[in-house]
Image (spheres, helix red, strand yellow):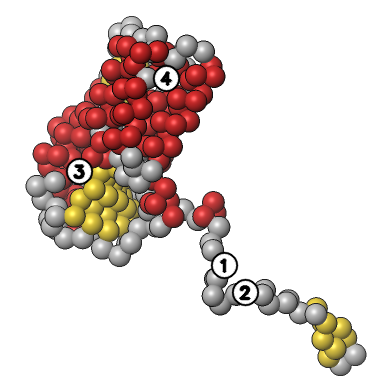
Amino acid sequence: TLQQEEGEMTLLEEEPLTDPAHPAQPDLSRLGPEVRPGQIVAATDEVKVRAPKKRQWQELRTARVTTPQGYRYLSGTGETFLAQLSLFLMLCAGPRQGLLTFLGDGARWIRDFFQKTVVPLWQQAEMILDWYHRKNKCYQLTRMLCRGRKLKKNLLKALLKFLWNGQVDSALALLENYRPQAKNEEKLDELIEYIRKNRQAIPNYGERRKHRQFNGSAHAEKANDLLVARRQKHRGMHWSLETSDALCALKTLMLNGGWDLYWQRGQVLPLAS
């Protein structure tokens, strides 16, 4: 619309027409998940760098822990990393307080840590298997047990639909019914076992998406990239575990905002502020 003021025409923005009975729905494709008040979101993963010996790798573990107040990166190796992560989670909110959302890719050490350390300490704790890794695992295994692209496409489509909606029993039944025509029963059993082992971490992804809840461990993947990959995974590089861990620790210190505190004042960044 136009409005005339002192001989000049001014363009006014027109208010959108809305139906009070049917309010406009947000565009979920432009909205990401959000951390709720009192919630802790922990995403963890491992990243491997080449060792000096041929065909050997060093494993580092990383995590990003997010609360409504901010986030903190963690890094380390083996049990030392798990002890640090456990302590940090308790310092964030204290045991048995709030909701702890634990995101991972289904690795055994992540499942074991959640069951043995997280579950006994939190009344409200949920583990979510990253949707991307789940989808990729199903894609890789269905390629090896289906006879032809069309059959693989049909099976994968039905399987992912069940898993996206959290219908684990239906997904397992689908795979069992496919057994007579599977060309590789060993891979079929591997896929069934993978789903069974992680069934407690398979939610209704669709419903979670509608409510802007976390479905993936992208925070952990980004932590791998920032803390390790950008510096240590270039062509021709190889590292001892001690050197790799030390470089990762320096990058962790920098991303957590403790660089100047350490180098100028000789103080270590507190594990939690």
Instruction: Measure the C-alpha gap from mark 2 to mark 1.
Output: 7 Å
Badge 2, how many Cα within 10 Å: few under 14, some, many 20+?
few
Task: Report the amino acid beneath label 2.
Answer: Thr
Q: Residues within 10 Å of mark 4 (few under 14, many from 20)?
A: many
State which tag comes first along the sequence, 3 or 4: 3
Q: Secondary structure at mark 3?
A: helix
Q: CA distance from mark 3 to mark 1?
A: 41 Å
Per the image, the residue denoted by label 4 is: 142
Residue 246 seen by the camera: no
Residue 30 in the image: above or below residue 231: below
Residue at 56% across / 77% down in the picture? 20
Between the C-alphas of marks 3 and 4, the distance is 35 Å
Q: 217 or 92, which lies in front?
A: 217
Q: Earlier in the sequence, mark 2 or mark 1?
A: 2
Amino acid residing under circle 3: Leu
**Disc marking residue 85:** 3
The reply, left or right, for residue 179 in relation to residue 158 is: left
Amino acid carrying label 4: it is Thr
Q: Which residue is mark 1?
A: 24
Q: Which residue is mark 2?
A: 18
Task: Residue 117: give x, y in percent of width and height.
Answer: 12, 42
